[in-house]
Image (spheres, helix red, strand yellow):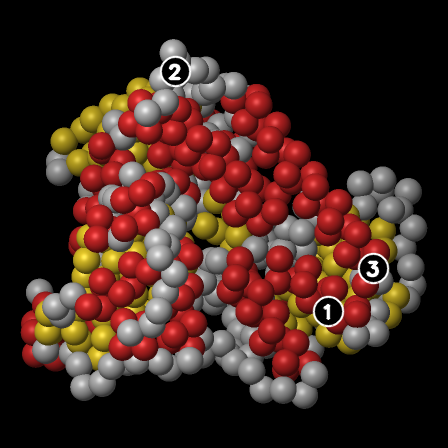
Amino acid sequence: MASLQERPEEYDLVILGGGTGSTIAAWTFASEGKKVAVIDRKYIGGSCPNIACLPSKNIIHSAKIASYFRRASEFGILQEGFKIDMSGVRDRKRKMVSGLNDMYLENYRKTGAEFLLGTGRFIAPKVVEIAFPDGTVRRLRGADVIVSTGTRATLELIPGLAEAQPLTHIEALELDQIPEHLLVVGGGYVGVEFAQAMRRFGSRVSLVDRNQRLMSKEDGDVCDAVRSLLEDEGIDILLGARVERVSGRSGDSVSVFVEQDGTQRVLKGSHLLVAAGRTPNTDRLGLELAGIELTGRGYIKVNDRLQTTAPGVWAIGEVAGSPQFTHISVDDFRVVHANLTGGNRVTQGRQVPYCLFTDPELARIGLSEREAESQGLPYRLFKVPMDSNLRARTLSETRGFLKCLVETDSDRILGFTAFGTGAGEIMAALQVAMIARLPYTALRDAILTHPTLVEGLIPLFSSPASAHSATEAAVTSAA
């Protein structure tokens, strides 16, 4: 029988959800002398180190090693075949996650923040009740409360989909056998990354997306480049296709019935991975009891200081509708920390860099051509293929391109996109230049180490630029 306390325990800060932003919040506020508690139902450190960013990149790197084995002769190395041991791939990932959990727990110990593994929900304004696995219950009241419960993979109400028990990214990271034929529904970050990785492990892979392009929010040249990459690796791609129903069971035999241009098709596979959007984790939290309102899309309603509609309650990360990246969750923490310690930081106007961890990577910061055109902004476009990068040539990794938008009436950098090896690291150099408000010429004229990937910015900015006027941009956008 659970024993309920008449009076909640008093804390300076109670954090519901243990994601990266809230974890750093806990450590920081506790180090500053605050009494802090973090509640998470399952994961130490939230999704990123356990079931998302870091373990997926671990698996992707194993897949890259497999691709090197297949390309061995290209590098002058002779070998007589190899075998993928998916249980070994999984165990390498598990070892990394375990080490991260130990590191996180040590940081909790050092800072004095309290980590509580249980299911939390509001029972009154700023009062959170925690149900623990052993049946006991605690109630905590925070002078301030942060909600950071994240999102989960969306399972649409498609006939037969739930009964098929499809994989999400969580189960895909725990596979101990190579799927014979993996069907992937969704052509965004998760779908594209997993499609390539599983193909490199030896699966036959078919990818279905409702949009006419993969990574459909990107510029056309980017969408085409990603599609070409996957097709060259033997992945079957079906675009503009709507899933109508599913039959069978993932892990055994599964069929996906799709409609494309008025024609019905059936895709048959051994496994089904659903990666078609995210749903905010706002159900069963008792938000209505705390006076916390939701948006029309089901995310927690916040202002640009990340305050909810309930006094003293804040929301950060994906559940607050922030861009779905761990680094944005960390910046959300900075916004809340500043506003709780006398500052006035907001989310408006901040940079949102991102990287798709295919091989090669896709990275972007600032405006794309599509966004500049929609705003009617004139720009100069610098663009070069990756084979102009001498370091990429030494690596035999010349697929892709670099491109940068520069303001027409000045030398200010508006945006940068890289599709190529080390794209995320190259992008970081551009981001720092943008933060410092440096003109593009500062990078063009810099002395950068040879041969490095970042050195490729010199031929990029030394190349002829094509001009795009405001009129042309508006016409392109309207079209």
Secondary element type, mark 2:
loop
Task: Name the amino acid type tagged 2.
Answer: Gln
| Vertical arrangement, residue 290 with respect to residue 452, above or below | below
Q: Position of residue 211 (x, y in %)?
A: 24, 47
In which quadrant of the rendered image does the C terminus lie?
A: bottom left
Can residue 277 be seen here? The reply is: yes
Mark 2 / mark 1, whichever is N-terminal:
1
Amino acid beneath label 1: Thr
Residue corresponding to mark 1: 28
Left-right relation of 40 to 476: right
Q: Nearer the viewer, mark 2 or mark 3?
A: 2
Spatial CA distance of label 2 from label 3 is 49 Å
Left or right, 454 with reference to 387: right
Instruction: Categorize mark 1 by other alpha carbons within 10 Å: few (<14), some (14-19), many (20+).
Output: some
In the picture, the disc for residue 110 is 3
Residue at screen point 91% across, 42% down: 1
> Which labelled disc corresponds to residue 79?
2
Which of the marked residues, 2 or 3, is nearer the chain's N terminus?
A: 2
